[in-house]
């Protein structure tokens, strides 16, 4: 089955640039509107424990103003759960978070942290927030997501993005196999991390992937071409790969 492929634009690094000077420019909410105008189906924002980019005020403003779905990326902590339950975004993606990392470096250990994650998946789900787990494209992690009752998983494509040649082909097969296993078990598969104009199409061509979440490359590319052109080109590449 080939389904529509949604694009979630991650706006974290608009906030990174804003925070470099501590003012209000560039505004992540304005970027979210521009991304929506250019064809984004949703906006993704990661409220990190250290608030290094997106802030609580950004989440308030996005929830108040955004007309397309917000996917809140969050660590499995009581603080983030409280924020998610207060705002009730369309979706929450649970990600592993380490204070010293530059970005989300790997997937969740859903298999090893069943008891801790079950509480967050249940509480978010009970509030009608669509929960996803950011995991490696690994059968053991998918089995864990099934046991947790997660409706969505997002496969970490960081390794796919960083290796080349035969290794990349192998990683792509791992993502395709993981996608099939998720779908077979009634879980909606998403993917993201490290995707760019050069590497998005093979992932977008996996017919059952429902959503790609892409941030750093799109915001970086926007420096050269503007956010509108950057998002539109990504959207066109995804559609071409899927079509
Ligand atoms: N999906 C998740 C769960 C992430 O944590 C990130 C990075 O914040 C992304 C997608 C987007 O990754 P990138 O910024 O490399 O496109």
Image (tube, grey):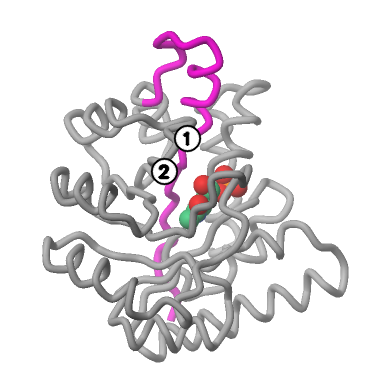
Side (left or right) of 72 relative to 197: left
Give the labeled residue for mark 1: 12
Residue located 35% across and 46% down the image:
42
Residue most toward the right? Answer: 165
Give the labeled residue for mark 2: 46
Q: Disc number at residue 51?
A: none
Q: Do the residues labelled 2 and 1 touch (CB within 8 Å)?
A: yes
Q: For ligand 1, tell me if the residue under mark 2 lies within 8 Å.
A: yes
Compute the Cα span from label 2 to label 1. 6 Å
Relative to 59, say whether 91 is above or below: below
Q: For ligand 1, tell me if the residue under mark 1 lies within 8 Å.
A: yes
Relative to 29, say whether 81 is above or below: below
Give coordinates of residue 73: x percent, y percent: 38, 50
- Quadrant location, the N terminus: bottom left
Q: Can residue 235 be seen in this view?
A: no
Q: Earlier in the sequence, mark 2 or mark 1?
A: 1
Q: What stretch is highlighted in magenta?
A: 1-28
Relative to 95, say whether 70 is above or below: above
Give coordinates of residue 177: x percent, y percent: 59, 85
């Amino acid at each position: 089955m080939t389904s529509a492929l949604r694009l979630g634009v991650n706006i974290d690094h608009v906030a990174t640039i804003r925070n470099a000077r501590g003012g209000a420019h560039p505004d992540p909410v304005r970027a979210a509107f521009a991304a929506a105008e250019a064809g984004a189906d949703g906006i993704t924002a990661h409220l990190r424990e250290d608030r290094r980019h997106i802030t609580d005020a950004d989440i308030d403003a996005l929830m108040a103003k955004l007309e397309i779905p917000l996917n809140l990326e969050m660590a499995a902590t009581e603080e983030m759960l409280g924020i998610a339950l207060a705002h009730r975004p369309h979706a929450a993606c649970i990600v592993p978070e380490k204070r010293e990392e530059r970005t989300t470096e790997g997937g969740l250990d859903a298999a090893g942290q069943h008891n801790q994650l079950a509480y967050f998946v249940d509480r978010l789900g009970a509030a009608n927030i669509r929960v996803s787990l950011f995991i490696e494209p690994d059968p053991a992690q998918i089995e864990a997501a099934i046991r947790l009752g997660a409706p969505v998983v997002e496969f970490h494509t960081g390794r796919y993005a960083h290796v080349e040649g035969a290794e990349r082909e192998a990683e792509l097969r791992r993502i395709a196999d993981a996608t099939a296993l998720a779908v077979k078990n009634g879980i909606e598969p998403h993917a993201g991390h490290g995707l760019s104009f050069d590497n998005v199409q093979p992932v977008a061509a996996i017919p059952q992937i429902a959503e790609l979440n892409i941030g750093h490359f799109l915001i970086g590319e926007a420096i050269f071409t503007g956010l509108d052109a950057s998002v539109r080109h990504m959207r066109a590449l995804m559609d071409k790969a899927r079509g």
